[in-house]
Amino acid sequence: MELCRVPAATTAFAWTNSISSTLQLPQTLFVGVGPKRFRVWCVNGNIESQKESQMVVSVTGATGFVGKRLVQRLHADKHQIRVLTRSRSKAQSIFPVKEFPGLVIAEEPEWRNCIEGSTAVVNLAGMPISTRWSPEIKKEIKQSRIRVTSKVVDLINNSQDDDRPKVLISASAVGYYGTSEARVFDEQSSPGNDFLAEVCREWEGAALKVNKDVRLALIRIGVVLGKDGGALAKMIPIFMMFAGGPLGSGNQWFSWIHLDDLVDLIYEALSNPSYKGVINGTAPNPVRLAEMCEQLGSVLGRPSWLPVPEIALKAVLGEGASVVLDGQKVVPTRAKELGFPFKYRYIKDALKAIMS
């Protein structure tokens, strides 16, 4: 049992409840003499248990929309974070030392030293897909994911057994399933045959090469909703100008997840050994895009009746318009089996929380 410092003038003291140290409760010290004794709590009784639960997490894609929130969550819970980046200056601007003391920022030549000795690696890196797709852009969309994933896996596999991370959480996307207005996809569904499905298959294939002693969770992520990034950040200004509405027909399925739920899902997967294999990172209740736009207009107090025609989207995004013009109904069967507690199960609640 550790002692707490008390003033030199104290004339008598007595320890009570030595069982508290066994139970990891705050230790109690009574100071003083007779009826004027008062109680002092010693709060360092469970420091060792805190150290044991602390993770060391290396994160790729940490400067992105999801990565930033994950790093903030890990930092708030006192875990050690190693940001694996291609741009130290960008990472330093997003994670300033004053706000993130102890956070390690490493460019690619230093990734090996960061991954070795980490408890886990979270791989979120990848070029955004909501842009006009030229042949060069399509190549970069694929290679940015496969290259980083392959590098991370190689570094994990080449680590000494004692230094090898125990967990790899690697992002994928619901684009794996292809598109459909009629089918419902879960983790057991077969892959599609379009460009994004091809990207996801190869992306996951690179992750699956990780050492079999490493627990691997592949999170197939839907459309992530948050105010400061992703698809919603692009839609809000349109609605605020009274020009919002369904994209294309509006009948396409919109498989979404609130940013906080996705971060919580990744966070749980870091420490819970039951989280392994493919897990869909989507909310339990996907909606048609027309309903999503209607709910967004309602929350913003703006009309949502002015549709954006397919020809206009294709003029801006080219082949990349398929991201919003086509859709798939994806359900998180595995997450529900695991008992994951979604905070935002319905689109209306998610949008209200984001815009409040």
Image (spheres, rainbow, N blue to C red):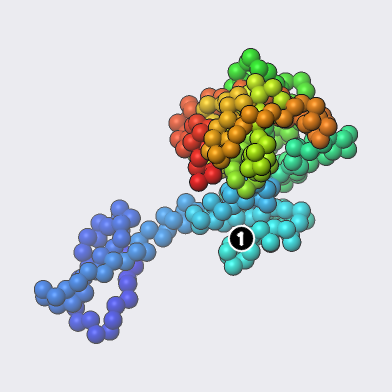
> Which quadrant does the N terminus fall into?
bottom left
* Residue 53 x, y percent position in the rendering: 47, 51
The answer to which quarter of the image holds residue 257 is top right
* Vertical placement of residue 308 versus 126, above or below: above
Q: Of 344 and 158, which appears nearest the observer?
A: 344
Q: Which residue: 32% across, 72% down?
A: 4
Q: Which residue: 66% across, 35% down?
A: 244
* Residue 146 x, y percent position in the rendering: 77, 38
* Vertical placement of residue 46 versus 65, above or below: below
For disc 1, the marked residue is: 103
The answer to which quarter of the image holds residue 175 is top right
Residue 221 in sight = no
The answer to which quarter of the image holds residue 238 is top right
**Residue farthest to the right?**
135
**Residue farthest to the bottom?**
9
Q: Secondary structure at mark 1?
A: loop
Q: Which residue: 64% across, 60% down?
A: 95
Amino acid type, callout 1: Leu
Q: Is residue 79 left or right of residue 241?
A: left
Residue 101 in sight = yes
* Residue 143 x, y percent position in the rendering: 81, 38
* Tag count: 1
* Vertical placement of residue 165 versus 325, above or below: below
* Residue 211 x, y percent position in the rendering: 67, 37
Q: Which residue: 63% across, 29% down?
A: 305
* Vertical placement of residue 314 versus 109, above or below: above
Q: Of 117 and 307, which appears nearest the observer?
A: 307
- How many residues crowd mark 1 within 10 Å: few (<14), some (14–19), many (20+)? some
